[in-house]
Amino acid sequence: GDGNMSGYDAVYTSDGDAHGDPGGEIRRWANTALDCLNATAVAASDDMSVRDGLRACGWRPRSEVEWAVDWAMSGEDANGELARHQSLRSFLPDEGYTWWGPHDDFVIDQHPRGFARLIDAMVQDVIPPGDSRILLNAEVVKVRYGCEGVTVTTRDGRVLSAEQVISTLPLGVLQRRHASLFDPPLPAPQREVLESRGISMGNLTHVVVQFPRVWWDDGMLKWLSANHGSNQSRGEFSLWHNLNHASLLPGSQTLLTFLGDPQSSLYEGMADADVRAALMRRLRAQHPRTRIPDPLSFFISRHGYDPNTHGAYSFFEPGWRDKYFATLTRPLAARCGAAQGGEEVVRVRLAGEAMCDDLSGYTHGGYQSGREAAAAYLHGAGKGPDPRDHDELSLCNW
């Protein structure tokens, strides 16, 4: 993964010298700091940031090259947020790597369905293509729940009824729209966790640029480029993946880079032509002795400006406590019977990556959360086992 600095083939100086870290000393220093974080984060206070932890582990970047390495190793290219804004205890250790191993795979499948092919495979036995039960482009504007059940209203006026609902609305949508979405409103403790307890949406922006020819060292899989005048971790087009590499998509003549906030929000708010121009200025400044042609094609993701997400995925700020998850994920219930003073009946269960404590921020966290919410519903309806008795149905709060 990008967190392992040994995976970078080179670190360029701000004047285009590929030998900014010729012996790999800075990258080894960064890896040592990351190992230290892994070993110490569990015992850290809830108020410590990733930046605090790095300083305690002896990582104190000063030079332009060191700041370029810092952006890649401090989580800012992973969560899209500054290290000083991220909770250390929620950053490391990463349960996904602890449980299933340290290796990442870079998916290069060029099928038109893209990432959706994973979902296609998972549901192929129960949801055939074109299944009328799946409603696409149906924006939910209201979720009403009570003793009679749940009704979900879409923007085009459709009303759907159910005994229970599993909501996988992204955290960014919940934070901005819960007041208008839910009737009755979310309980006050739940609103407080959503609004002021330190869980937020991070924004990681993908930028892909294709050229008429390969002008870079095609033997390198990925590298870092320092920017002139950098005295803080900014990540201004610093990290580059060579998608044309023989192990990826040879012939694509394409580079991939990432942006985290505040650059994510800045560039996502600009027109494509302006972002492309800024990227090319930065690339040419990073390689002043190389003639870089104008690109053929360009793409930038805009998760932060997407009203259906308001960010890429969740992260936790210093001050977040794991105990808040119990409040955040508590199902919405109606009190029914005995003149509405009787037992609570669950009507809405909250799922999605942000609701999965140990796997938040990941697709498999969203999958696991939904699986656990469905298992809880089935158990309550007498149709399935108690999830608490099955490890595979309790990973989110292990």
Image: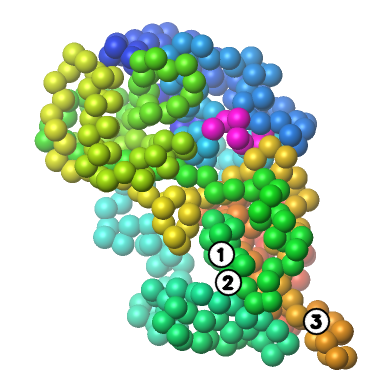
Q: Do the residues labelled 3 and 2 touch (CB within 8 Å)?
A: no
- Residue segment shown in magenta: 82-88
Q: Nearer the viewer, mark 3 or mark 1?
A: 1
Q: Which mark is residue 177?
A: 1
Q: What residue type is labelled 2?
A: Leu
Q: Nearer the viewer, residue 335 or 211?
A: 335
Q: In this image, 36 relative to 286: left or right?
A: right
Label 3 amino acid?
Answer: Arg
Left or right of residue 83: residue 269: left
Labelled pair 3, 1 in contact (Cβ < 8 Å): no
Q: Which residue is drawn at 61% across and 36% down?
A: 86
**Which residue is tagged 2?**
181
Numbered circle sitting on residue 24: none
The amino acid at mark 1 is Arg
Which of the labelled discs sits on residue 335, or is there none? 3
- Residue 38 lies, in percent from the top left, at 66, 30
**Marks 2 and 1: in contact by CB < 8 Å?**
yes
Q: Is mark 2 on a helix, strand or loop?
A: helix
